[in-house]
Image (cartoon, rainbow, N blue to C red):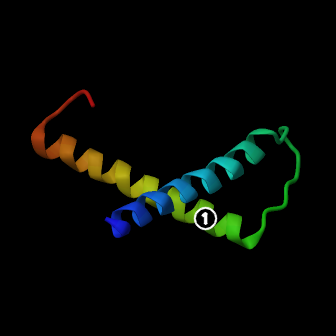
Amino acid sequence: MDAKAEVVSERTKLFIRRERVRRELIRTRPGETICLRYEQVEMLLKWMKELELRVKGLEERIKRYGIKDV
């Protein structure tokens, strides 16, 4: 049971970190230069890759099973 709780807490921590960075980015104005720490950039790149893989998987399912609305 501890392993499951640990996974959930890691997911929660990751969500919170992502949400903090997202909110920081939302506050920026168009044309404004921002500085991100290495950890933030690394997290954003991993997040983007994860989202790209998720979209790719959904597109493959749509093609395979012929589902038009997701």
Residue for point 83% across, 42% down: 28
Residue for point 84% across, 61% down: 35
- Quadrant position of residue 17: bottom right
Q: Position of residue 42 (x, y in %)?
A: 63, 69
Residue for point 42% across, 57% down: 8
Q: Which of 4 and 68 is in front in this view?
A: 4
Q: Which of 10 and 20 is in front in this view?
A: 10
Q: Position of residue 31 (x, y in %)?
A: 86, 43
Specify the farthest residue to the front: 1
Q: Where is residue 51 in the image (x, y as percent from the top left)?
A: 45, 53
What residue did someone put label 1 on? 43
Looking at the rendered structure, the secondary structure element under dot 1 is helix
Looking at the image, residue 12 lies above or below residue 68 = below
Q: Where is residue 40 in the image (x, y as percent from the top left)?
A: 69, 64
Q: Residues within 10 Å of mark 1 (few under 14, many from 20)?
A: some
Quadrant in which the N terminus is drawn? bottom left
Q: Which of 52 and 63 is in front in this view?
A: 52
- Type of amino acid under label 1: Met
